[in-house]
Image: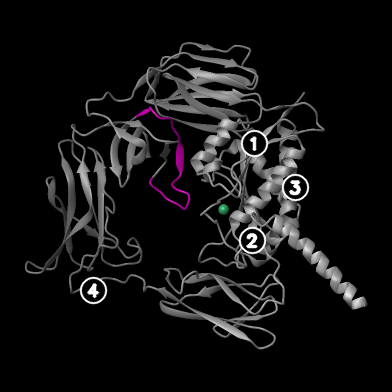
Amino acid sequence: MVRTIIITLLFTSNIIAQIKINSYQQLSPVQPKTIIDSLFLQVQRPDKDTLRTFNSHYRIAACTRPDAKAFINDKQTKVYASGAFVELLHINVDTNTFRFTVKSPAGDSLWKEFVIIRPAPMKNSPHDTLVIEQAMMEPAEDMWLASGDILEVKFKGSPGWETSFDIPDVESGIPMRELSPGEGGGFAGVYIGRYAVKPKDEARDVQIKFHLKKSFWTSEKKTSKAKISILSKEMPRVAEVIGKRPYLNAGLGEDRLGGSKLGFLQEGIRVEITGKSGSQYRVRLSPSMEAWLPEEFAKLLPPDTPLPRALAGAISAAGNNSEDIVTLTLSEKLPYSSEQLVNPNAITVDVYGATSNTNWISQPRSAKGIESITWRQVAADQYRIIIGLLHPHWGYDIDYAGHSLRIKIRRPPVIPSPDSLLSGLVIAVDAGHGGDNNGSIGATGVLEKDMNISMAYYLDSLLSEKGVKVVLMRTEYDTPAMSERIENILRSNARLLVSIHCNSAGEASDPLALRGVSTYYRSPGFKPLADIMYDNMLAIGLKPFGEVGSFNFTLNSLTQLPNVLVETAFLSNPDDEMLLLDDGFRKKAAEQILKGLEEFVRIYSEMK
Ligand SMILES: [Zn+2]
C-alpha cells in the first residue's frame, strides 16, 4: 500500500514534469531519460562513419543510458548522470579506428565503429628529382597591384638548387633565394622572391612562372594558379560602396567570424581602390592607412572618375529629447571610421580623403550631452572630429544626410524611479542561431538553438513583468538572418541588446577542460555591461571562463546601443550541459541577465 502510494506520487510528479516539458516542447527537445528505456547508443561526434582531420586530437561526444558503462576501444570512460560521455581522442597519422561500446547492467551491449583519417604532414621535397609543389605557393589568390607595391612570391620544392620567377609581359628571370628551415616553416626548399612594381609596368591576369634549375639539361617549371594584374591608368581607381551593411576590413586576416573590421560604411560612399587580393579590394584611406573592401560591396566606376576628396567645412551640433547630433559639412560622401574612447568618454570619427577648412563649430546649448567638439588634421587626407561626452556611452550612429556627415549620439535614458529601473525601456533580446542553424550540440543531442530560445523566452517574460517592451530577435518558428536582426534592432529604437548563446569547445579541444560562462563586447564603451553581466552570471556558481573585448561577433559590432553577448555555459562540457538541460537553471540564468540589465541601468542611466 505504502509502496503503491509512493509509486503513484512519483508517477504524478513525473506527469507534471512531462506536461511542463510538453508545453515547452517546441522550445526544447529535452526529454527525461528513464532507466526503463532499452539500452541505446547515440553518437553526436563524429557525425559520420569516416572523417578526416589534420589535428592530433579529436573531441567525441555521445550518450547512452545513464546506468550503462561506456568504452572507447576497450578503455572505459565516465558516463554522466545525463547519459553523456565525452573524450578527447589522440589521433595518429594515417587511419584510426575507434569502437564505441556501451553495456547495460544486465549485460546487453551495443557498439558503433568510426574511422578517423589524419593525413601525413608535409615533408621536404626530394633533392634529386626536381619538384615544385603547389601546396605553399604564393601568390595564393588573384591580385591587383599598383606602382610601388612589392610582389612577394614563394614556393616549396626540391632544396638546394637555383630558382627564379617570371612575371609574363613584365620581367623574366627574377632570382629567388632559399629560406633556412627556420624561416621556411620547418622545411628545406622554401624559396622566396620579390619584385617592386614600376610605374610603367602593366599586366592583366598573368600567372607567375617558377623555375627550378639543377643544370643546363635538368630543370623544372611550374605556373601559379593565382593571376596577377598590374593596374594601368585605364583600370578603375574609384568604387562606389553598395550593398547591405557594407564594411571595411582592417587587413586580410580571417577567423571563424570573419576578418577584423575597421568599421561599417554606408551605400553611396566613394573609395579609392589601389589593388586587390583574392575577393577584396585594397582601399587607400590616407597615405599611411589602407583597408580592404569585400568585392560584393564595391561597384567600380569608370577610370576617369575623380578621386574621392573633399574639404571638411563647418561643424554644428544640436540636441533633441534623447540624442545630440553633430553634423560635418562635406562636398562628397567619404569613407570614415569611428572609435569610442573611455576615461574621459569621447567619440572620434576619422573622415578619409578630407582636408580641413573648418573655421566654425557652433555649439548650441540643446546638445546637452556634449562637453566639447574639436577637430584635428591627423594626416594628409585624414580629418578627425573629437566629441567629448558628459555622460556614459549609450551608443551612436553615423550616416550621411546628403553630403553632410551626421553623428547621432544617444544620451542615457532617464529613469523615472529607482523602483522601476527598466519600465518603459525597449530592450532587444537575441537568441543565437535558429532554424537550420542549430549552433553547437551537446553529447545528449541537445541543440544550442533550443537552449538559447528557452533562456530568451524566460528573459522576455521577466522583462515584460518589469514593464519593458521586449524586441525578440527570433522565436522558435522563425530565423531571421543577421542583417534582418540588425535592421530590427535599429528600427525598434532599442536601448540595450543582449545576445544569448551556449559555448562549445573546438574540434580538437578538451571538452572537460573548457566550461563556464563568458561575456563579450566589442567597443570599450560597452565593457561595463559585459562586466556586470559576467559578475551576475558568476554569482550562480558558473565557472569563470572569461570576458572578451574587441570581439568580432556581428551583433557586438553595433555602435548604436550598449550590447553584450552572454555565452552562458559550454554545451560540450557534460557538467555544463546538465546545467543547461535543467529548466530551473535556464530560468535562473535569465534572472541573472535581468539583474545585470537592472544594475547597468541603475549605475549608468540618469535618475529623474
Ligand atoms: Zn552560438
Tell me, yes or no, whether the two marked residues, 2 and 1, touch with CB atoms within 8 Å.
no
Vertical position of residue 35 compared to residue 555: above or below: below
> Which residue is label 1 attached to?
496
Measured as percent of width and height from the top left, residue 368 is found at 65, 18
**What secondary structure is marked by label 1?**
strand
Q: Which residues are magenta?
A: 252-270
Mark toward the viewer: 3 or 2: 2
Determine crowd level at label 3: few under 14, some 14-19, many 20+ residues with C-alpha closer than 10 A: some
Q: Earlier in the sequence, mark 4 or mark 1?
A: 4
Q: Earlier in the sequence, mark 3 or mark 4?
A: 4
> Which residue is label 4 attached to?
126
Q: Earlier in the sequence, mark 3 or mark 2?
A: 2
Vertical position of residue 242 compared to residue 10: above or below: above
Q: Earlier in the sequence, mark 2 or mark 4?
A: 2
Cα distance in 3D space between marks 1 and 3: 16 Å
Mark toward the viewer: 2 or 4: 2
Tell me, yes or no, whether the two marked residues, 4 and 1, touch with CB atoms within 8 Å.
no
Determine crowd level at label 1: few under 14, some 14-19, many 20+ residues with C-alpha closer than 10 A: many
> Which residue is label 2 attached to?
29
> Which residue is label 3 attached to?
591
Query: Is the magenta region chiefly helix, strand or loop?
Result: loop
Q: Is residue 568 visible?
A: no
